[in-house]
Amino acid sequence: MPCRVILAVAALLAAHAAEAACPPAPRPACREAGMSRLRIGTDDAGQVRRFRWTWKLGARTALGEFGDPLASSAYSLCAWEPAGPVAELELPPGGTCGGVPCWRLQGTTAYRYRDPAATQAGIESVRLQASPQARTRVTVVARGDGLQAMTPPVAAPLTVQLLRNDSPICFEAILAAASFTRPATRPATRPARPPPTRSSTTA
């Protein structure tokens, strides 16, 4: 199971490896989470269709340490196996998604990226939640046809980092396992229900 999970993660991240911005090795001194979870969903053919990485209960982080994704701070989601880099997903600053800004400031503590069409590297949503205590949270969700399969085997553990590209600030999780799900198989058509039977009485 762990090998299959790691392969699925690599499949997702390999989709846009050609646009490399990740370093050859994990960035040092990244902020670690008190809890991190990775969920991956595939279709019946084994192709990655959905990816959700949650990094939470992290070290205190001010909103300004996330930079300015509304205008200038790009992010990269990067992964490495012990032998070297696997691949990445890139998320540029600014932009318009469905006629509205992709990035938005939520209150005074968070940035939110939302693209229902998942046009940028399959990324559907990102949330960067600051906290003055050890409750900083990062969530990345990606999905769709842009998540290509990767054939080479990938070794565990897998290091996943979200890098701010205009700063040394980064967020890290080292994963040996993840939740791995497949959609339930459903019949193509629903069988027709038999007509109800009625009892009759004879006087």
Image: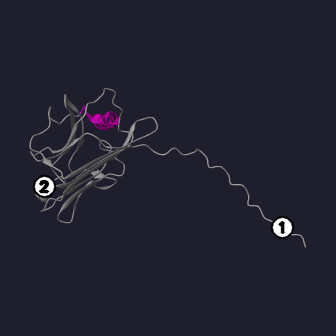
Q: Is residue 125 left or right of residue 144?
A: left
Q: Is residue 186 above or below residue 150?
A: below
Q: Amino acid at mark 1?
A: Ser
Farthest-out residue, top = 152
Q: Which residues are magenta?
A: 1-18
Pointer 2 local density, CA inside 10 Å: few below 14, some 14–19, many at least 20: some
Q: Amino acid at mark 2?
A: Ala
Residue that carries the numbered disc 1 in the rendered image = 200
Which part of the image, by quadrant, shows the C terminus? bottom right
Mark found first going from the N terminus, 2 or 1? 2
C-beta proximity under 8 Å, tags 2 and 1 = no
Q: Is residue 133 magenta?
A: no
Residue that carries the numbered disc 2 in the rendered image = 59
3D distance between C-alphas at marks 2 and 1: 73 Å
Pointer 1 local density, CA inside 10 Å: few below 14, some 14–19, many at least 20: few
Majority secondary structure of the magenta segment?
A: helix
Q: Provide the secondary structure element on which disc 2 rests.
A: loop
Q: Residue at x 18, y 51 (%)?
A: 33
Quadrant location of residue 89? Answer: top left
Q: Position of residue 63 (x, y in %)?
A: 13, 59
Q: Is residue 22 above or below residue 123?
A: above
Q: Position of residue 70 (x, y in %)?
A: 19, 54
Q: Is residue 106 above or below residue 92?
A: below
